[in-house]
Image (cartoon, coloured by chain):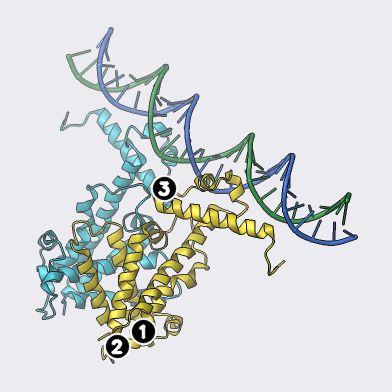
Chain colours: A yellow, B cyan, C green, D blue
Amino acid sequence: MLSVVPTARERARARTTEAILAAARTQLAEVGAAALSLRAVAREVGLVSSAVYRYFPSRDELLTTLIIEAYDAVGEAAEAARAAADGTARESWVAVWRAVRAWAQAHPAQYALIYGSPVPGYAAPPDTLPAAGRVGVVLGAIATEGRADDPSDPADHVVAAIAPDVSATLGVDPRLGPAAVSAWTLLFGTVGFELFGQYENVVLDRETYFDHVAGAAATAVGLP
Amino acid sequence: MLSVVPTARERARARTTEAILAAARTQLAEVGAAALSLRAVAREVGLVSSAVYRYFPSRDELLTTLIIEAYDAVGEAAEAARAAADGTARESWVAVWRAVRAWAQAHPAQYALIYGSPVPGYAAPPDTLPAAGRVGVVLGAIATEGRADDPSDPADHVVAAIAPDVSATLGVDPRLGPAAVSAWTLLFGTVGFELFGQYENVVLDRETYFDHVAGAAATAVGLP
DNA sequence: ACACTTCCGAGAGCACTGCTCTTGACACGG
DNA sequence: CCGTGTCAAGAGCAGTGCTCTCGGAAGTGT
């Protein structure tokens, strides 16, 4: 119990768990979430299907692990982009937007897993909530850092529509809440629409359009 | 062939086709798209599974029919809302936004089918493209009707990022293109985020927040 | 060193899926 | 009235998630 130095069994278990996850990630990228087959994962690892259940109690549990991984990955991409940017707050903002889009392009199946329609019969467990907010935290920090005093604050009842926790966690002025949530929505809406084919025959130059939207959103949250 | 007066066989075929579609709609609402089972549909209709293949060559064909139906339904909801509104262009705009949201709340599975992640291994056939644009057409028409002269037009290269067909089909000023596409994205992004649970513990008062976003989007497309 | 407990992988099996193919019955048109 | 074309049914294939049992291996306490 809680041994600091892992036993051979524990190490073997960790290795197998990681092998299963690696195979699941491959499967996910190749066939998508809904077609992810536990038996195929088992085959790839060299196990029989029932053995996998010793590591994940169900297919949904496996998916949950992948979902958290994906949230963390896109959050890390956003944080890395912010860390790498050294210009104005507006430039950081655009850099983070671009990073999220680039991550989605590179990992479409993971993106669909977390921002597409939920897998049928699958209810996202609360475990995923903290990981889901990382991109929002990054954007909120940038907006607060670079915000000019903006006279066009929303009415009080609109401000109250956003949970106080959000402003607190993000460290932003509560009056920025609605605009921040809206910008966050627009970011993932734009990335999703492009990825899921809604911009087919509509948006010709995706980069130019995306940068324009990112800039407009920056203005909307008060970045000069 | 192409008989004006349908034979008994043709009528029977049309009846069975409609019965299958009705059962599929029920299934879709109950278990979602990815779990829609052709055998379950057949059972509900009172057929054996293989008989369904006389009417739809594959499960994907059935889904395609449902997708087009869903696009048409949400488009009709938007058009009806516009027709019923008799105030300013801004009021019409907000009414259409609300109608889309209400439709999505009433038909979450259909909404997920068309605006969620694509069903795995399923590529949306071109048949769905015209139906997909109906909501955009309604919004574009309202924006054009009520637009005030707006000095903040985007740069030429941004305008050129949007397909000319779009402005032509929507009948809007091409300079409005980027803002219109962005507003369209924000509408479905917001509705989708609410429906798929991303606003859990984030947006408390959904109606107030939604109306605020709708109004901001109206301003962004130049509605006074 | 031996016994005991825990863990793990394999295999069989259940109920389900999409889809194909064959077979027999029925309705329609010449 | 009889050939033709359409239809539903049934069996079957390969696959799925998941459960249960069983034998062996690894770790633990005496």
Residue picked out by circle 3: B27
Distance from disc 2 to disc 3, alpha carbons, whole Å, reads: 46 Å
- Labels 1 and 2 positioned on one and the same chain: yes
- Tell me the SS state at disc 1: helix
Q: Position of residue B19 (x, y in %)?
A: 35, 40
Task: Give the label on residue A159, or none.
Answer: 1
Residue picked out by circle 2: A153
**Residue at the spot 20% in from the left edge and 58% down from the top edge:** B134
Quadrant position of the N terminus of chain A in the picture:
bottom right
Q: Are marks 1 and 3 in contact (CB under 8 Å)?
A: no
Identify residue type, mark 2: Asp
- Tell me the SS state at disc 2: loop
* B142 or A173: nearer the viewer: A173
| Chain bearing mark 3 | B
**Residue at the spot 21% in from the left edge and 73% down from the top edge:** A212
Identify residue type, mark 1: Val
| In the depicted structure, whether residue C9 falls above or below residue A148 | above
Q: Position of residue B125 (x, y in %)?
A: 25, 47
